[in-house]
Image (spheres, grey):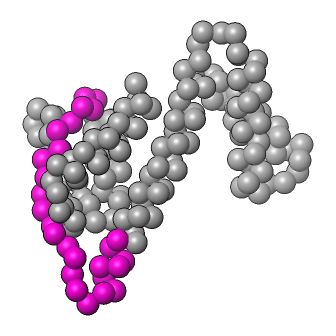
Amino acid sequence: MKGKFLSNILLTFVWVALTGSFAFLNFLFGFAIAFVILWVINIKRENTKYFKIVPKIIAFFFFFSYELIKANIQVAYDVITPKFYMTPGIVKVPLDVKTDIGITLLANLISLTPGTLSLDVSDDKKVLYVHSMYISDKEKFIKSIKKGFEARLLEILR
């Protein structure tokens, strides 16, 4: 997988050098073209982990961006209106993620989202304690983390 990624980056820089444009969109376009070229070259091979992970990472980026915008709007609305809609609380979220890197990534993604903060991980690494400004339904909140951030993160890490 590392070799394909480096090949993709190299082909991206070749594209940028040939076009002569160092704009960010040209880098993205070059990366997409290089990805398609490598995918076509390796279409018959069994080792396709790279070609499964890259689309999942891109999808995760858009999912996280959506969640980030949604949380920002919710917090900003609560700040600018005279009435508070907050129902703060601390929730124990059971973890399916087992690795240290997975737990760290999940905790950081939750903390990056406005209105939520990862507080602690249990000693046995089975529970993540999360503070949220908006917990109207505890089970719904846990389900949103488990089916949202954690499920998508597990798809990438496995």
Q: Residue at x 19, y 53 (%)?
A: 130
> In the shown orientation, is residue 154 left or right of residue 24?
left
In the picture, which quadrant includes the N terminus?
top right
Do we see residue 119 in this rendering? Answer: no
Determine the residue located farthest toward the bottom in the rendered image: 82
Rendered location of residue 26, percent (x, y): 77, 51
Image quadrant containing the C terminus: top left
- Residue 129 falls left or right of residue 104: left
Report the residue at 15% width, 54% height from top.
Answer: 138
Q: Which residues are magenta?
A: 74-99
Q: Is residue 68 visible?
A: yes
Q: For the point 57% across and 35% down, which residue is it? A: 55
In the shown orientation, is residue 27 left or right of residue 154?
A: right
Q: Residue furthest left?
A: 123
| Quarter-of-image position of residue 79 | bottom left
Quick check: 97 above or below 76? above
Q: Is residue 69 left or right of residue 16?
A: left
Indicate whether 44 appears above or below 39.
above
> Depth check: 31 or 66 in front?
66
Residue at horizontal 40%, vertical 72%?
73
Q: Position of residue 145 (x, y in %)?
A: 28, 47
Q: Is residue 17 magenta?
A: no
Q: Position of residue 2 (x, y in %)?
A: 58, 24
Instruction: Inspect the magenta stretch and tell me whether residue 84 lies in it.
Output: yes
Of the pair 68 and 18, the residue shown nearer to us? 68
Would you place residue 30 above or below residue 116 in this image? above
Task: Residue 98: give x, y in percent of width and height.
Answer: 25, 29
